[in-house]
Image: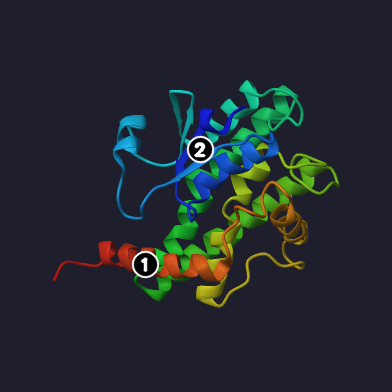
Amino acid sequence: MAKNDLKVLGAWPSPFVMRARIALNIKSLDYEFLEETFGSKSQLLLQSNPVHKKIPVLIHGDKPICESLVIVEYIDEVWASSPSILPSQPYDRATARFWASYIDEKWFPAMKGIAAAQAEEARKAAIEQVAEGLALLEDAFQKTSKGKDFFSGDKIGYLDIAFGCFLGWLRVTEKMNGIKFLDETKTPGLAKWAHKFCADAAVKDVMPETEKLAEVAKIITAKLRGAGAPPK
């Protein structure tokens, strides 16, 4: 596959963009990464994703594919040769999709809620929600990994990508709030999994450095708290 045939519209801090890039790396596909300017939307993005106007967008030839997990599934279906990303068994695929949906709809919004919280009480409530979610995901990991390194077993798969893309932001959240979410006492499976995930060849070059990401987080946090502040 020629590099020009595959393009990813995105921004390096975005966990959702990382999903597409990890999937392409797993399949050993060359692609051109078109960096969007932070805080603005290019004409190509608006043309490629006129509905949501959001990154990531995968452009395959002249065809745009939008939404991060849709992109991951598309990559796995089009380049179906090994290594596969989605589980081979229908029940395992359904389980992976269930937890991916939970992460996007429940867990990640709770983590964003920590940054957006105006009052200490709201911040503590959001922290508790994140911790409760990680306890559920720890249990899911123990059941689905079957004692192996990843949710998908011996190698990174769909749920690993769906959750692992948030590890950079989880580290930043820990750093900025003086807390520890993943530790070997409360979440031993996830703690080991996170280390192996970040060290994987498909991930390590696209996982943002914590310090660099923290600078972006400060800007986003200021905007979130400004948006939630009562009018004067």
Q: Which of the image's four quarters has the C terminus?
A: bottom left
For marks 1 and 2, give the CA distance: 23 Å
**Residue at 61% across / 34% down in the picture?**
97
Q: Are marks 1 and 2 in contact (CB under 8 Å)?
A: no
**Residue at 66% across / 37% down in the picture?**
158
- Residue 210 image point, x, y percent: 57, 67
Closer-to-camera residue (31/186)? 31
Q: Which of the two labelled residues, at mark 1 and mark 2, occupies the earlier sequence position?
A: 2
**Residue at 52% across / 39% down in the picture?**
32
Q: Quadrant of residue 96?
A: top right
- Residue 204 image point, x, y percent: 67, 55
Amino acid at pointer 1: Ile
Q: Which of the image's four quarters has the N terminus?
A: top right
10 Å crowding of disc 2: few (<14), some (14-19), many (20+): many
Q: Secondary structure at mark 2?
A: helix
- Disc marking residue 219: 1
> Farthest residue toward the left?
232
Can you identify the residue that label 2 sits on?
A: 68
Q: Secondary structure at mark 1?
A: helix
Closer-to-camera residue (97/85)? 85
**Residue at 56% across / 37% down in the picture?**
31
Amino acid at pointer 2: Ser
Q: Taking 129 as reference, is 22 left or right?
A: right
10 Å crowding of disc 1: few (<14), some (14-19), many (20+): few
- Residue 17 image point, x, y percent: 50, 45
